Image (cartoon, helix red, strand yellow):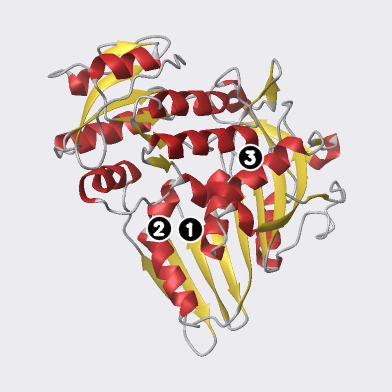
Amino acid sequence: MTDMTSKPHPTGPSSTAAPLPVVLAGARGHGRWHLANIRRLQHQGLVRLVGICELNPLTDGELDSFADEMPEQSADFGALLDSTGAAAAVVCTPIPTHTALALTAAGRGVHLLLEKPPAATWADYARMTEGVREAGIACQVGFQSFGSHAVTAIKELVRSGAIGDVRGIGAAGAWVRDDAYFRRAPWAGRRRMGGTDVVDGVLTNPLAHAVATALELAGRGTAEDVASIETELFRAHDIESDDTSCVRVTTADGLPVTVAVTLCAEDAGEPYVIVHGDRGRVTFWYKQDRVLVQRAGHGPEESVHGRTDLLENLVDHLVRDTPLLVPPERTGAFMRVLEAVRTAPEPAVLPAGAWRTEPSGKGDGVRRIVHGIDGTVAAAADTLTLFSELGASWARPSEVTTP
């Protein structure tokens, strides 16, 4: 799927007009969400799906909503961009393929919505960002939470001094995933495959939004903002990657950003980010666009905000020069975290006494539950401390990385 032959397309903000011809690479799995979103925007006249890149073509049933104009299908991404004349591409393929496909699009002048994480290694990320810059294309990274209008509202609230001086950012995610989740694809739950980095850990893929959103609310999203990173990586499941982990980023100006996440929760909860001030706090449930403000001298204030879709923002950028919400440089700090996870020692295997199994409720599936982990991840976000500092019996001292 990675034909790298360069054949520039005559596209750009001055020559691109809606509906924007779009190719989707990766239309199954999470790609189904992108397929539905493209259909929604196509009905609004903003985009037109002209091609789908999949190793196995989608069936007519999977494409029934596009029956009036069936998109071209091919396993060769570069050839599909050429034959369709696509102006933009949505890339939702396995993590290790992101850089090659992004560079394929860049070589043809095709703009990008690149699913998170943008690359599997820092080197690949740097190569991708340089290729995008040299090609002069627009690239949007798929951290959907950055499109929440709550992000702007929280930043303005913090700038106003409503919660005093910010002393740190915490984030927590307690999700439930069963053994079938780690069999959903050959790369699932892997750190590498055949010498190729995958880095499909809880911090870097399923709950990557918790990390990226915390860094964004801290206002320290670029690579240069990171001074050091401490990681504590664990796994209860029989996989290579981590399923229960925490990380603490210390920024260049000393602000701590601590994220604790698990796929082995007792009960599935909504992930959230807390902005801690010395006179209050703001909690942001980023999947719900919901904000709770708690501060001295005021009662709790809760609000729900709208959201701008990232593909729609990309179209607006190309047509009206609206600023991109998630250009690659705003994910540099996140990629420093991913690189720290990638280069850390292998995740520690949790002892059998630290977890139990239960039926998943899906056929004969089984899930593993780490004892007390729901409260532990919440406490880490609340106190900006790591698992080992909270006294978890299975935690070990953190690994510290300086970028």
Distance in Å between CA atoms under marks 1 and 2: 6 Å
Contact (Cβ within 8 Å) of mark 1 with mark 2: yes
What is the number of the mark on residue 374?
none
Distance of mark 1 from mark 3, alpha carbons?
18 Å
Regarding residue 58, the answer to whether it shows in the image is no
The kind of residue tagged 1 is Trp
The residue carrying pointer 1 sits among few (fewer than 14), some (14 to 19) or many (20 or more) residues within 10 Å by Cα, namely many
Quadrant where the N terminus is found in the figure = top left
The residue where tag 2 is placed is: 289
* Residue placed under numbered mark 3 in the picture: 202
Residue sitting at the far front? 134
Return the x and y of residue 111 as percentages of the image width and height: 34, 34
**Residue shown at 80% from the left, 33% from the top:** 346
Which comes sooner in the sequence, label 3 or label 2? 3
- The residue depicted at 43 percent of the width and 62 percent of the height is 151
Q: Is residue 210 left or right of residue 237?
A: left
* Mark carried by residue 285: 1
Residue 2, given in percent of the width and then of the height, sits at 47, 16
Which is more toward the observer, 352 or 100?
100
What kind of element bears circle 1?
Answer: strand
Residue at 68% in and 40% down: 339
| Residue 401 point in image, percent of width and height | 78, 49
